[in-house]
Image (tube, rainbow, N blue to C red):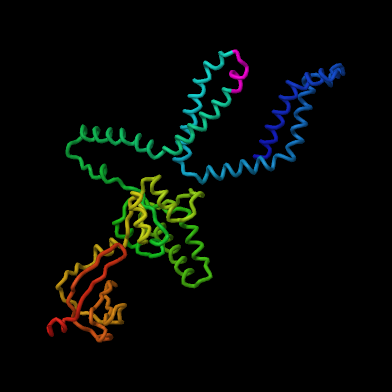
Amino acid sequence: MVKRIVQLFFVIVGGTLGYLYFPLLLEIMNIGDIGWFASSYACAIYGALILFFTTFWLVDYIVGLIRKIEEALVKAPITEILFGSLGLIVGLIVAFLVMIPLKSINFQVLSTIIPIFVTLFLGYLGFQVGFKKREELINLFSIPARLGSKDKKKQTSEIEPIAEEYIPKKLKILDTSVIIDGRIADICQTGFLEGTIVIPQFVLEELQHIADSSDVLKRNRGRRGLDILNKIRKELAINVEIYEGDFEEIQEVDSKLVKLAKLTSGVVVTNDFNLNKVCELQNVSVLNINDLANAVKPVVLPGEELSVQVIKDGKEHNQGIAYLDDGTMIVVEEGRDYIGKRIDVLVTSVLQTSAGRMIFAKPKLLEKAL
């Protein structure tokens, strides 16, 4: 269909050029006295045929260019297209206003060439300003809306709850690691994660790549992630959307997630410690499910007694390693001699980070001996 439209465009352009300029060309060549064959209508047919035959060599390249532009526009986020177009329109309006006094100048160069240059320059400048300042424009337009909604709410009711106004249900953008982890499905099922779940297409592609890996462990993890997504979409009462856009200028999936979160004012949901830090550095909201898991673990304070089984030796000299039922690692000082035994220990300190929690303890028997 596109190919036919391009050919029709060339035929119309060729006919117009032939109608306007071929009679003048024949007159210059002194062959304008051959009757109907030199008429304007015949010249229009000549021009249409010439450009039509030209399309056999050019149409494939033009259609390919159109396809590339179409793919780029489809993949681009709607905010980039919208604000870029608004900037282009404003630039063209300014160019039109600037050209009004230029048209009154009798100098041929200024009245013909300069307006074309001004139109192209201001149109491009407007598009770039709208495209690169879209986040500031979004915030600028949202401020009056928020103020207006607050005033309206105060006028209608003084006792109406305002929690939703100050804590909006932001988009929750899942990364690959949190999908493979699997706990996100249980969190969604409990209702602690509200709002719309967004799964970017580039995350799905990474999951598919992992699921197709030749490595058995990676392949199983990728398939587990795909199963978790199917469970969230089909079995849980939560809204799930697929983001089809992509950021081709960015290679890393984590960087794409941060970019998407900035554009949508969304929240990245992850259990990746490094991605968590990147989001914090770039002022992007992030939910780390490891933080949630640590928050619901029983609180252990220094001085408390625990009964643990020492499983293996630690990295440092005479250290032993034990684990609680929830998987928390306990480093037992002077516990190497108790490997394979269950002993009572006293907690000396607790280290809490987004990567997990680590408890340091020492055998209670040593405390009594001291």
Q: Going 72% across and 25% down the picture, which residue do you hit?
A: 17
The foreground one among 220 and 295 is 295
Image coordinates for residue 201, horizontal then vertical, percent: 48, 53
Q: Main secondary structure of the magenta part?
A: helix
Whole-percent x, y for residue 319 in the image: 27, 80
Task: Identify the residue at horizontal 77%, vertical 26% (top origin).
Answer: 45
Query: As drawn, is 65 to the left or to the right of 38?
Result: left
Question: Depth check: 88 or 188 in front?
Answer: 88
- Image coordinates of residue 51 in percent, x first then y, are 74, 32
Looking at the image, residue 318 sits to the left or right of residue 6; the answer is left
Residue 362 position, x and y percent, is 20, 78
Taking the magenta stretch, the answer to whether it contains residue 60 is no
Q: Quadrant of the C terminus?
A: bottom left
Does the stretch in magenta take in 112? yes
The quadrant where residue 180 appears? bottom left
- Please give the range of residues in magenta: 106-113
Q: Is residue 37 above or below residue 370?
A: above
**Up-down relation of residue 18 to residue 79 (above or below):** above
Q: Is residue 87 above or below residue 184?
A: above
- Horizontal side of residue 298 vs 224, given as left or right: left
Q: Residue at x 18, y 74 (%)?
A: 347
Taking the view exactly as shown, the residue that stands out farthest to the right is: 34
